[in-house]
Amino acid sequence: MQRKKRVLILSEGFGAGHTQAANALAVSLKRMSPHVQTRVLELGSFLHPTIFPMIFNAYKKTLTSQPKLYGMMYRSQYKKKVGRLSQLALHRIFYAQTAHIIRTLKPDTIVCTHPFPNIVVSRLKRSAGLDVPLCTVITDYDAHGTWISAETNRYLVSTPEVKNKLIARGVPSRIIRVTGIPVHPNFWQPQDKGAIRAEFGLKAMPTVLVMGGGWGLVNQEELLKYMVAWRDRIQFIFVLGNNRKAYEEMSADPAFDHEHIKLLGFTREVDKLMEVSDLLVTKPGGMTCTEALAKGLPMLFHEAIPGQEEENAQYFTSNGFGEQLKSVETIDYWFRRLVMQYDEVLQRRQLLTQMLQRTNPEDCSKAILQMVN
């Protein structure tokens, strides 16, 4: 009996989007081909479960408390590949163990949804003779220099604009495919709204989904209280992720104690929540925005982190899929539309969903299967 083809998908836990893309690919590949076996690993967490959470927390703290500093670092390195010093550090931390994982799992193709494992695998190909095709899936609407390596055999990117940015930096056009960012197949499938509302205890009324709790959005107390002042006419779902402190504080606050307000922690059912929502308020992470787009859900973007989130927001606003949340007047405009022009909002979403259904959400998986076979 011929063994199944093996796809090793490597990610990192710096924000949930990279690993969500990796898991979405794994599910899609299995559904498309029973002859493919997948394995998803967050490389740093897998190899260094004690040290890596500390690195992640330091990264998150910098991102939320000093976003301008992060933006300066992002832009200063924008057109550069990872420096030799950083490559050496990653080499020391990951090199031998990653090589051992690859020898053990014997993948036919390696897919990276984050720059760090991409750098490590590229170095193994360059200096250790690793002969496994490498596919890089860029999970934002921009192309930072850290994604680029001569050892990558195929780039899968979100838009033609990202492809052009790679070409401008010397990446051959023939190895770049515009496939969109992979999302879980559930986001492309219509679902029973009534059943979802019953499951979460929601009403059939204009609904706003607020995400980004783990990255500082819920720290904007004045903004949130301004929004929930509409709670008699609009239903709110707050997804707070693993931010337990925010969950406890909001649960104890009378402003959020209302039959039309639902507070949730970490959930794997964002597809259902987006299905029954009419507007998403979020930070413009590439994955969240792509999931919302798959559902035809209009978006308001709150304080993009300088760097890739700014590029994400620019893409979605310029294409009419979202708007920057610049002031409370933006909230008033959208909330009035939900209350007074609800049928029009639903109709626009239906038209957008129909347009999106003409695209092929499995292009990313198909491109990887071509590499495997």
Image (cartoon, rainbow, N blue to C red):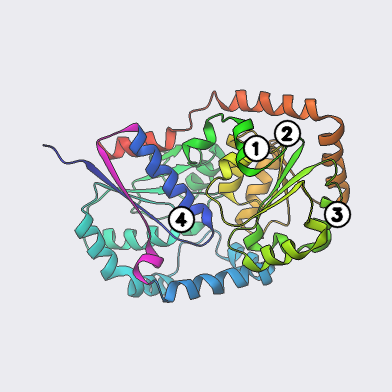
> x%, y% of residue 93?
35, 73
Callout 4 touching callout 1 (CB < 8 Å): no
Residue with the mark numbered 2 = 204
Please indicate whether residue 373 sits to the left or right of residue 114 in the image: left
- For marks 2 and 3, give the CA distance: 22 Å
- For marks 4 and 2, give the CA distance: 44 Å
The circle drawn on residue 197 is: 1
User: Observer-nearest residue: 302 or 268?
Assistant: 268
Q: Nearer the viewer, mark 1 or mark 3?
A: 1
In the displayed structure, would residue 64 be above or below residue 319?
below
Q: Is residue 36 magenta?
A: yes
Q: Which of the marked residues, 1 or 2, is nearer the chain's N terminus?
A: 1
Taking the spot 72% from the left edge, 67% from the top edge, the residue there is: 249
Judge the density around disc 4: few (<14), some (14-19), many (≥20) Cα neighbours within 10 Å: many
Residue 137 shows in the view: no
Please indicate whether residue 333 sits to the left or right of residue 156 in the image: right
> x%, y% of residue 98?
29, 64
Q: Nearer the viewer, mark 4 or mark 2?
A: 2
